[in-house]
Amino acid sequence: MTKATRPTILVVNDDGITAEGIKALMHAMKDLGRVVVVAPDSPQSGMGHAITIGKPLRLDKVDVYEGIEMYSCSGTPVDCVKLAVNAVLKGQKPDLCVSGINHGLNNSINVLYSGTMSAAVEGAIEGIPSIGFSLDDYSAQANFEHCVKYVKEIAQQVLANGLPVGTVLNVNFPAGDDIKGIKICRQANAKWAEEFDMRHDPYKRPYYWLTGVFQNNDNGQDTDVWALEHNYVSVVPVEFDMTAHHAIPVLNNWKFNL
Protein backbone atom coordinates (compact mmCIF):
# COMPACT_ATOMS: atom_id res chain seq x y z
CA MET A 1 0.00 0.00 0.00
CA THR A 2 1.52 3.33 -1.04
CA LYS A 3 1.30 6.48 1.02
CA ALA A 4 -1.05 8.01 -1.56
CA THR A 5 -3.54 5.15 -1.21
CA ARG A 6 -3.39 4.73 2.55
CA PRO A 7 -6.89 4.88 4.02
CA THR A 8 -8.00 7.64 6.37
CA ILE A 9 -9.02 6.25 9.77
CA LEU A 10 -11.07 8.29 12.25
CA VAL A 11 -10.38 7.40 15.89
CA VAL A 12 -12.86 8.42 18.60
CA ASN A 13 -13.78 7.31 22.13
CA ASP A 14 -15.85 8.19 25.20
CA ASP A 15 -13.20 7.99 27.92
CA GLY A 16 -11.48 11.19 26.82
CA ILE A 17 -8.57 12.11 24.62
CA THR A 18 -5.92 11.23 27.23
CA ALA A 19 -7.27 7.74 28.05
CA GLU A 20 -4.96 4.74 27.73
CA GLY A 21 -7.50 2.94 25.54
CA ILE A 22 -7.53 5.53 22.78
CA LYS A 23 -3.74 5.69 22.94
CA ALA A 24 -3.56 1.95 22.21
CA LEU A 25 -6.15 2.22 19.44
CA MET A 26 -4.52 5.12 17.61
CA HIS A 27 -1.11 3.48 17.68
CA ALA A 28 -2.61 0.25 16.30
CA MET A 29 -4.23 2.21 13.47
CA LYS A 30 -1.02 4.07 12.56
CA ASP A 31 0.20 0.95 10.76
CA LEU A 32 -2.94 0.79 8.64
CA GLY A 33 -3.42 4.34 7.40
CA ARG A 34 -3.60 8.05 8.08
CA VAL A 35 -5.00 8.54 11.57
CA VAL A 36 -7.23 11.47 12.58
CA VAL A 37 -8.32 11.59 16.23
CA VAL A 38 -11.33 13.57 17.46
CA ALA A 39 -12.17 12.76 21.08
CA PRO A 40 -13.90 14.33 24.08
CA ASP A 41 -11.87 16.62 26.32
CA SER A 42 -13.22 14.75 29.37
CA PRO A 43 -14.83 11.34 30.07
CA GLN A 44 -18.26 10.85 28.49
CA SER A 45 -19.11 7.29 29.51
CA GLY A 46 -22.78 6.32 29.48
CA MET A 47 -23.76 9.21 27.21
CA GLY A 48 -25.34 6.91 24.64
CA HIS A 49 -26.25 8.72 21.42
CA ALA A 50 -26.51 12.16 23.02
CA ILE A 51 -25.69 15.23 20.94
CA THR A 52 -25.09 18.83 21.98
CA ILE A 53 -27.75 21.27 20.77
CA GLY A 54 -28.11 23.87 23.54
CA LYS A 55 -24.59 25.28 23.63
CA PRO A 56 -21.64 25.79 21.25
CA LEU A 57 -18.99 23.15 20.74
CA ARG A 58 -15.26 23.73 21.08
CA LEU A 59 -12.81 21.91 18.82
CA ASP A 60 -9.12 22.43 19.55
CA LYS A 61 -6.17 20.93 17.74
CA VAL A 62 -3.79 19.33 20.22
CA ASP A 63 -0.28 17.95 19.97
CA VAL A 64 -0.17 14.92 22.27
CA TYR A 65 1.43 12.15 20.18
CA GLU A 66 3.95 12.84 17.46
CA GLY A 67 2.77 12.22 13.92
CA ILE A 68 -0.94 11.96 14.75
CA GLU A 69 -3.49 14.64 13.89
CA MET A 70 -5.57 15.13 17.04
CA TYR A 71 -8.50 17.31 18.09
CA SER A 72 -10.09 17.74 21.51
CA CYS A 73 -13.86 18.28 21.50
CA SER A 74 -16.02 19.73 24.28
CA GLY A 75 -19.01 17.59 23.24
CA THR A 76 -20.18 13.99 23.33
CA PRO A 77 -18.69 11.03 21.42
CA VAL A 78 -21.37 11.43 18.73
CA ASP A 79 -20.54 15.15 18.48
CA CYS A 80 -16.92 14.11 17.86
CA VAL A 81 -17.89 12.02 14.83
CA LYS A 82 -20.14 14.73 13.41
CA LEU A 83 -17.45 17.41 13.82
CA ALA A 84 -14.77 15.11 12.43
CA VAL A 85 -16.71 14.54 9.21
CA ASN A 86 -18.01 18.06 8.76
CA ALA A 87 -15.34 20.35 10.24
CA VAL A 88 -12.06 18.43 10.30
CA LEU A 89 -12.35 16.35 7.13
CA LYS A 90 -14.54 18.95 5.37
CA GLY A 91 -17.16 16.43 4.30
CA GLN A 92 -14.66 13.88 3.00
CA LYS A 93 -15.65 10.71 4.82
CA PRO A 94 -12.92 8.51 6.29
CA ASP A 95 -12.48 4.94 5.10
CA LEU A 96 -12.94 3.58 8.61
CA CYS A 97 -14.18 4.82 12.00
CA VAL A 98 -12.93 3.05 15.13
CA SER A 99 -14.10 3.87 18.65
CA GLY A 100 -12.44 2.92 21.96
CA ILE A 101 -10.73 1.01 23.25
CA ASN A 102 -13.25 1.46 26.04
CA HIS A 103 -12.29 0.93 29.68
CA GLY A 104 -15.05 -1.59 30.49
CA LEU A 105 -17.30 -3.99 28.59
CA ASN A 106 -20.04 -2.95 26.19
CA ASN A 107 -21.61 -6.37 25.68
CA SER A 108 -25.33 -7.27 25.70
CA ILE A 109 -27.66 -4.42 26.76
CA ASN A 110 -24.72 -2.08 27.45
CA VAL A 111 -24.60 -1.26 23.75
CA LEU A 112 -27.63 1.00 24.24
CA TYR A 113 -25.96 3.17 26.88
CA SER A 114 -22.41 3.18 25.57
CA GLY A 115 -20.81 6.36 24.29
CA THR A 116 -18.14 4.20 22.68
CA MET A 117 -20.68 2.26 20.63
CA SER A 118 -22.81 5.30 19.89
CA ALA A 119 -19.80 6.97 18.26
CA ALA A 120 -19.32 3.88 16.09
CA VAL A 121 -23.04 3.79 15.28
CA GLU A 122 -22.90 7.45 14.25
CA GLY A 123 -20.04 6.57 11.92
CA ALA A 124 -22.21 3.87 10.34
CA ILE A 125 -25.11 6.31 10.02
CA GLU A 126 -22.72 8.53 8.07
CA GLY A 127 -22.01 5.59 5.75
CA ILE A 128 -18.56 4.87 7.22
CA PRO A 129 -17.54 1.27 8.05
CA SER A 130 -17.31 1.46 11.85
CA ILE A 131 -16.17 -0.64 14.82
CA GLY A 132 -16.44 -0.16 18.58
CA PHE A 133 -13.81 -1.82 20.78
CA SER A 134 -14.10 -2.43 24.55
CA LEU A 135 -12.06 -4.28 27.19
CA ASP A 136 -13.25 -5.97 30.39
CA ASP A 137 -11.13 -3.70 32.59
CA TYR A 138 -12.50 -0.49 34.10
CA SER A 139 -9.16 0.68 35.48
CA ALA A 140 -7.73 3.96 34.19
CA GLN A 141 -4.39 2.12 33.96
CA ALA A 142 -5.81 -0.86 32.05
CA ASN A 143 -3.34 -2.82 29.90
CA PHE A 144 -4.45 -3.07 26.27
CA GLU A 145 -1.38 -4.80 24.82
CA HIS A 146 -3.11 -8.16 24.33
CA CYS A 147 -5.92 -6.47 22.35
CA VAL A 148 -3.78 -4.77 19.71
CA LYS A 149 -3.24 -7.67 17.29
CA TYR A 150 -6.96 -8.45 17.29
CA VAL A 151 -7.85 -4.78 16.81
CA LYS A 152 -5.56 -4.59 13.79
CA GLU A 153 -6.80 -7.86 12.28
CA ILE A 154 -10.49 -6.94 12.61
CA ALA A 155 -9.85 -3.43 11.25
CA GLN A 156 -7.94 -4.87 8.29
CA GLN A 157 -10.79 -7.24 7.52
CA VAL A 158 -13.27 -4.35 7.52
CA LEU A 159 -11.00 -2.22 5.32
CA ALA A 160 -10.62 -5.11 2.87
CA ASN A 161 -14.21 -6.39 2.84
CA GLY A 162 -16.38 -3.53 4.04
CA LEU A 163 -19.51 -4.10 6.13
CA PRO A 164 -23.17 -4.66 5.21
CA VAL A 165 -25.09 -1.40 4.92
CA GLY A 166 -26.41 -0.19 8.27
CA THR A 167 -24.16 -2.52 10.27
CA VAL A 168 -21.51 -1.70 12.87
CA LEU A 169 -19.29 -4.15 14.76
CA ASN A 170 -19.35 -4.32 18.56
CA VAL A 171 -16.08 -5.95 19.65
CA ASN A 172 -15.37 -6.85 23.28
CA PHE A 173 -12.17 -8.27 24.80
CA PRO A 174 -11.94 -10.44 27.91
CA ALA A 175 -9.54 -9.42 30.66
CA GLY A 176 -6.08 -11.01 30.62
CA ASP A 177 -4.00 -12.24 27.72
CA ASP A 178 -5.26 -15.87 27.60
CA ILE A 179 -7.45 -15.25 24.54
CA LYS A 180 -8.55 -18.37 22.62
CA GLY A 181 -9.67 -16.61 19.44
CA ILE A 182 -12.53 -14.63 17.90
CA LYS A 183 -16.22 -15.57 18.03
CA ILE A 184 -18.93 -14.01 15.85
CA CYS A 185 -21.84 -13.73 18.29
CA ARG A 186 -25.31 -12.45 18.91
CA GLN A 187 -26.13 -10.01 21.69
CA ALA A 188 -27.03 -11.86 24.89
CA ASN A 189 -30.36 -11.40 26.63
CA ALA A 190 -28.78 -9.85 29.70
CA LYS A 191 -29.34 -6.65 31.66
CA TRP A 192 -28.48 -4.77 34.82
CA ALA A 193 -30.73 -5.23 37.85
CA GLU A 194 -30.39 -1.66 39.03
CA GLU A 195 -30.60 -0.21 42.51
CA PHE A 196 -30.24 3.32 43.80
CA ASP A 197 -28.25 3.71 46.98
CA MET A 198 -29.62 6.71 48.89
CA ARG A 199 -26.99 8.68 50.79
CA HIS A 200 -26.85 12.09 52.46
CA ASP A 201 -24.59 15.06 51.83
CA PRO A 202 -23.07 17.14 54.69
CA TYR A 203 -26.27 19.21 54.76
CA LYS A 204 -28.36 16.04 55.32
CA ARG A 205 -29.93 16.30 51.88
CA PRO A 206 -30.47 12.95 50.15
CA TYR A 207 -28.77 12.00 46.91
CA TYR A 208 -28.74 8.75 44.93
CA TRP A 209 -25.91 6.62 43.57
CA LEU A 210 -26.68 4.11 40.83
CA THR A 211 -25.56 0.55 41.58
CA GLY A 212 -26.66 -2.85 40.34
CA VAL A 213 -25.91 -6.46 39.48
CA PHE A 214 -25.45 -7.80 35.96
CA GLN A 215 -27.93 -10.59 35.22
CA ASN A 216 -27.53 -12.96 32.28
CA ASN A 217 -30.85 -14.55 31.32
CA ASP A 218 -29.43 -16.30 28.27
CA ASN A 219 -27.99 -19.83 28.31
CA GLY A 220 -26.95 -19.76 24.65
CA GLN A 221 -23.39 -20.58 23.67
CA ASP A 222 -23.51 -18.21 20.71
CA THR A 223 -23.71 -14.97 22.75
CA ASP A 224 -21.21 -12.26 23.54
CA VAL A 225 -21.51 -12.98 27.27
CA TRP A 226 -20.66 -16.69 26.75
CA ALA A 227 -17.72 -15.85 24.48
CA LEU A 228 -16.20 -13.43 26.96
CA GLU A 229 -16.68 -15.80 29.89
CA HIS A 230 -14.76 -18.43 27.89
CA ASN A 231 -11.91 -16.08 26.93
CA TYR A 232 -12.93 -15.33 23.35
CA VAL A 233 -13.09 -11.95 21.65
CA SER A 234 -16.77 -11.36 20.92
CA VAL A 235 -17.80 -9.69 17.65
CA VAL A 236 -21.46 -8.75 17.35
CA PRO A 237 -22.83 -7.11 14.17
CA VAL A 238 -25.24 -4.38 15.34
CA GLU A 239 -27.96 -2.58 13.37
CA PHE A 240 -29.11 0.96 14.04
CA ASP A 241 -32.49 0.29 12.37
CA MET A 242 -34.47 -0.39 15.55
CA THR A 243 -37.67 -1.41 13.76
CA ALA A 244 -39.16 -4.60 15.22
CA HIS A 245 -40.00 -6.02 11.80
CA HIS A 246 -41.51 -9.21 13.26
CA ALA A 247 -44.06 -7.09 15.17
CA ILE A 248 -45.47 -5.29 12.11
CA PRO A 249 -47.81 -8.17 11.06
CA VAL A 250 -49.06 -8.43 14.66
CA LEU A 251 -49.83 -4.71 14.85
CA ASN A 252 -51.50 -4.80 11.42
CA ASN A 253 -54.11 -7.13 12.93
CA TRP A 254 -55.14 -4.55 15.50
CA LYS A 255 -58.56 -2.96 15.01
CA PHE A 256 -58.33 0.75 15.70
CA ASN A 257 -61.70 2.15 16.81
CA LEU A 258 -61.57 5.67 15.41
Image: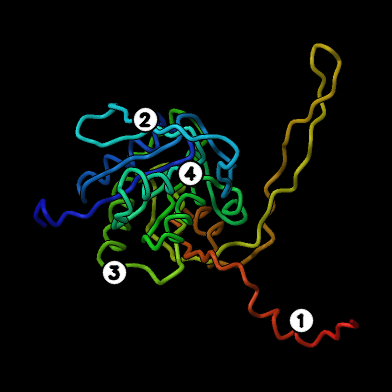
Return the mark for residue 162.
none
Q: Is residue 175 visible?
A: no
Q: Secondary structure at mark 3?
A: helix
Q: Nearer the viewer, mark 1 or mark 3?
A: 1
Using the numbered discs, state the Cα–Cα distance from disc 2 to disc 3 in whole angstroms: 34 Å
Using the numbered discs, state the Cα–Cα distance from disc 1 to disc 2 in whole angstroms: 49 Å
Q: Secondary structure at mark 1?
A: helix
Residue 244 position within the rendered picture, expressed as x and y whole percent measured from the top left: 65, 74
Using the numbered discs, state the Cα–Cα distance from disc 4 to disc 1 in whole angstroms: 36 Å
Instruction: Check disc 2 and report the residue beneath it.
Output: 60
Using the numbered discs, state the Cα–Cα distance from disc 4 to disc 2 in whole angstroms: 14 Å
Could you say which quadrant of the image residue 146 lies in?
top left
Using the numbered discs, state the Cα–Cα distance from disc 4 to disc 3 in whole angstroms: 27 Å
Label whose residue precedes the other's in the sequence (4 or 3): 4
Residue closest to the eye, 254 or 87: 87
Binning the other alpha carbons within 10 Å of mark 2 as few (below 14), some (14 to 19) or many (20 upward) gives few
* Residue at image point 11% right, 57% down: 1
Instruction: Check disc 4 and report the residue beneath it.
Output: 79
> Total marks drawn?
4
* Residue at image point 31% right, 49% down: 90
Instruction: Check disc 3 and report the residue beneath it.
Output: 161
Could you say which quadrant of the image residue 208 lies in?
top right
* Contact flag, marks 1 and 2 (Cβ < 8 Å): no
